[in-house]
Image (cartoon, grey):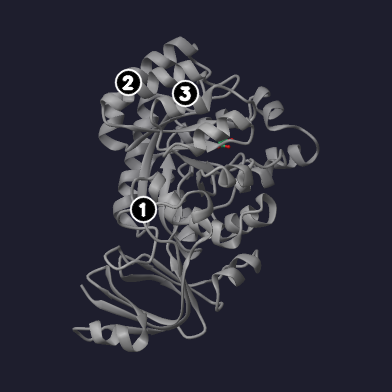
């Protein structure tokens, strides 16, 4: 494999370690006028140009990064990326006053995407998803979690897991697959029947997925139902990460901590008591600022979570109904502008802590010697400017495992 020298970056900005919690999220390692040497996809040296040159043992391809900041590849740890169709009519209805729940009651929402997804072939789903992944890569995402949940029957859920596996092999972004059969109850089945079918599907789903998820919410799944599913799924090696407290306060956080969830996601309606419990755990609080922006229903208490010591990640929640964006730069901006994460906290949340929630932070999520070289070279001299100057793409070159996968 070729080697690479990223020469003389104006700034290298990164968190370090396995994860950062509470006040540590604000502490970045910042280097000025520094270089990075990569060999066989692994970061071998970081430091001043002269120090890094001493570590070079071959003739690397050189990228002049003067005037640019370099950050770790962005990690989008909560998406629903494989689906057919779009739902801009629902967006227009919401702009006119309807709520997400009103639309779901009228047969729209998740079930309308389920209909479109069931009608699509595997090739059609792959083709659409590949375009979305290419867009995410251009915006600096190098690792992404993808949930199923728009099949809601055995055949389509497994098809979605196969699509994710094939896409993982066919394009540069590393994909972490999550089985979200418990996203909604399909119209043709009772909840009891559907839950039974999900239990029966677990052994096969576990061969293709890494995580198990459930939408714990009024009119979807109760904490008890999700707990039974998670406990069973764990026997097949699936690790829970769950949708909890999105529209209503519920028992999701306490249950999620009981089942040892890697991540509890959404948390818009989390109570102070649950903030305390989550903050003392090793479970990541994954916040989704773009869904709050998109649905206009208020933001999760990010400051309280961080100030209480939680491990906070942020993700796009890319999906057609509540967050039609896969732009992690925008996600960092909204996290800072609306949830009051410091710019350093937003970067930590979108890289290292998100990687930790996927159990990948031993390999990715920060710029450290020995980690994989997933890097984004920005068109601005500081990561702060990239977050603050919002709404445009600041990725200039995106590197995955030491290979330039996208550049402009
Ligand atoms: O995370 N809440 C559940 N799932 C998505 C919405 C999915 C959809 O509306 O299609 C979310 O917001």
SS of the residue at dot 3?
helix
- In this rendered view, identify the residue nearer to me: 362 or 194: 362
Horizontal and vertical percent for residue 324? 59, 48
Q: Is residue 57 left or right of residue 379?
A: left
The quadrant where ligand 1 appears is: top right
- In this rendered view, identify the residue nearer to me: 307 or 337: 307
Instruction: Tell me which numbered mark, 3 or 1, is placed earlier along the sequence.
Output: 1
Nearest to viewer (mark 1 / mark 2): 1
| Number of numbered tags placed on the structure image | 3
Instruction: Determine if residue 88 is in view.
Output: no
Instruction: Tell me which numbered mark, 3 or 2, is placed earlier along the sequence.
Output: 2
From this view, report whether residue 20 is shown above or below residue 273: below
Q: Residue at x 54, y 22 (%)?
A: 251
Q: Residue extending furthest right? A: 96
The residue singled out by tag 2 in the image is 232
The residue singled out by tag 1 in the image is 18
The residue singled out by tag 3 in the image is 255
Mark 3–mark 2 distance (CA, rounded to whole Å):
14 Å
Mark 3–mark 1 distance (CA, rounded to whole Å):
25 Å
């Amino acid at each position: 494999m070729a080697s690479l020298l990223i020469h003389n970056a104006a700034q290298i900005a990164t968190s370090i370690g396995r994860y950062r919690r509470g006040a540590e999220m604000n502490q970045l390692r910042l280097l000025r006028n520094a270089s990075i040497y990569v060999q066989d996809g692994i970061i071998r040296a970081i430091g001043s140009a002269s120090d890094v040159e001493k570590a070079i043992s071959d003739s690397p391809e050189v990228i002049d990064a003067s005037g640019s900041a370099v950050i770790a590849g962005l990690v989008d740890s909560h998406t629903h990326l494989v689906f057919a169709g779009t739902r801009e009519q629902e967006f227009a209805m919401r702009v006119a006053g309807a709520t997400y729940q009103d639309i779901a009651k009228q047969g729209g929402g998740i079930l309308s995407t389920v209909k479109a997804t069931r009608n699509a072939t595997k090739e059609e789903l792959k083709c659409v998803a590949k375009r979305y992944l290419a867009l995410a890569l251009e915006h600096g995402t190098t690792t992404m979690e993808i949930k199923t949940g728009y099949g809601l029957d055995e055949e389509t859920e497994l098809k979605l897991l196969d699509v994710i596996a094939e896409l993982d092999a066919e394009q540069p972004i590393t994909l972490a697959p999550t089985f979200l059969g418990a996203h909604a109850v399909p119209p043709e089945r009772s909840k009891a029947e559907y839950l039974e079918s999900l239990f029966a599907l677990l052994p096969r789903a576990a061969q293709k997925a890494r995580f198990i998820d459930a939408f714990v919410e009024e009119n979807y799944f109760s904490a008890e139902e999700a707990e039974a599913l998670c406990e069973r799924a764990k026997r097949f090696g699936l690790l829970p990460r769950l949708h909890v407290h999105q529209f209503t306060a519920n028992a999701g956080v306490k249950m999620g901590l009981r089942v040892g969830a890697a991540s509890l996601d959404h948390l818009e309606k989390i109570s102070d008591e649950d903030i305390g419990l989550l903050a003392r755990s090793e479970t990541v609080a994954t916040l989704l600022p773009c869904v709050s922006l998109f649905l206009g229903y208020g933001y999760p208490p990010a400051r309280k979570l961080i100030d209480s010591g939680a491990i906070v990640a942020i993700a796009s929640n890319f999906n057609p109904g509540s967050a039609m964006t896969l732009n992690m730069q925008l996600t960092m901006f909204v996290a800072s502008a609306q949830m009051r994460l410091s710019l350093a906290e937003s970067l930590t949340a979108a890289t290292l802590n998100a990687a930790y929630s996927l159990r990948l932070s031993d390999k990715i999520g920060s710029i450290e010697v020995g980690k994989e070289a997933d890097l984004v070279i920005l068109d601005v001299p500081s990561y702060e400017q990239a977050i603050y100057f919002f709404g445009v793409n600041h990725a200039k070159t995106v590197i995955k495992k030491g290979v330039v996968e996208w550049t402009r």
